[in-house]
Amino acid sequence: MAQIAFHSLAESAYLWTAMMVADEKGVSHDLSLIEVGSPEHLRLHPFGKMPVMQHGELFLYETAAIAHYVDRAFDGPPLQPADAAGQAQVIRWISIVNAYVFPVMNRFMKERLVRPAWGAEPDQAFIASAREPLALQMRLIGEAAGALGYLVGDRLTLADCFLFPHLLFFGRTPEGAAMLERSPQAAAWLARMTARPSYVGGAMSRMYEAFGSLPRPKGLAWAAD
């Protein structure tokens, strides 16, 4: 029997973060699929988001809280530094991902890959507006990862688990691939993450491979700049 269960859709990027945290800790987990917006879903998460973690009688929502709980409640390698400054850096990066990276990279991927797969045109105004924030985000990622190999220090932390799904799928777009080519530090970090056992053969890697069959996007005005 698995130690914890996640309630979510299988394609949720934040589910993948939570699963990666559990896998890095060596915590077994099951996935219980939800019907989005159903009474059961809203009972588990009043804001209608995902995932929700279940550990015995405890139900916990918000991925930052879930990740912190799994790291503290179970044995396994610690995913947060012991010192206050290191912990603050991890929290800062989680906040950066949630507030800035996710709204831009996740939507960019959907505009470039998901909407065309459904026969819809991407929002070119959004794509153009994303250029500057994406450049800033990639610069900060490269600077952090280029220092000691991970976002905070020389080993994986919760911060890396939060960023990973977003940069992985953004890199599937032509613009993302071009930006990674121009940022060897960020590209090396991404390669390091995709080589980890918590990714290889997991749900995120299977979903990533499925994106290879999506139509190639058009109108790449700044992909190769």
Image (cartoon, rainbow, N blue to C red):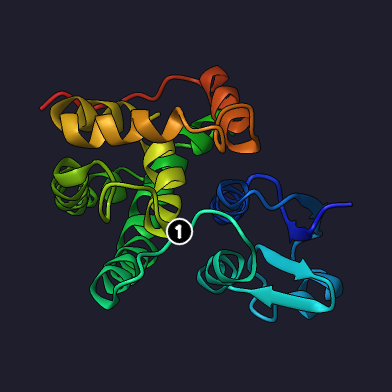
- In terms of depth relative to the viewer, which is nearer, 17 or 177? 17
How many C-alpha atoms fall within 10 Å of the one at disc 1: few (<14), some, or many (≥20)? Answer: many
In this picture, residue 199 sits left or right of residue 98: right
Image coords of residue 109 (percent x, y): 42, 40
Image coords of residue 164 (percent x, y): 42, 45
Q: Which residue is mark 1?
A: 79
Q: Which residue is found at the position 80% from the left and 59% from the top?
A: 34
Instruction: Residue 60: name its quadrant.
Output: bottom right
Q: Is residue 94 above or below residue 164?
A: below
Q: Secondary structure at mark 1?
A: loop
In this picture, residue 73 sits left or right of residue 111: right
Q: Is residue 73 above or below residue 161?
A: below
In this picture, residue 125 sits left or right of residue 62: left
Q: Using the rendered image of the protein, determine whether residue 90 is visible from the camera's viewpoint.
A: yes
- In terms of depth relative to the viewer, which is nearer, 38 or 217? 38
Q: Is residue 138 above or below residue 73?
A: above
Image coords of residue 118 (percent x, y): 59, 34
Image coords of residue 8 (percent x, y): 72, 57
The kind of residue on which mark 1 rests is Leu
Number of disc labels: 1
In this picture, residue 18 sits left or right of residue 162: right
Q: Is residue 218 above or below residue 112?
A: above
Q: Using the rendered image of the protein, determine whether residue 112 is visible from the camera's viewpoint.
A: no
Q: Which residue is found at the position 56% from the left and 18% from the top?
A: 213
- In terms of depth relative to the viewer, which is nearer, 26 or 34? 26
From the image, which quarter does the C terminus lie in?
top left
Outermost residue to the left? 225
Q: Which residue is found at the position 30% from the left and 65% from the top?
A: 96
- In terms of depth relative to the viewer, which is nearer, 24 or 35? 24
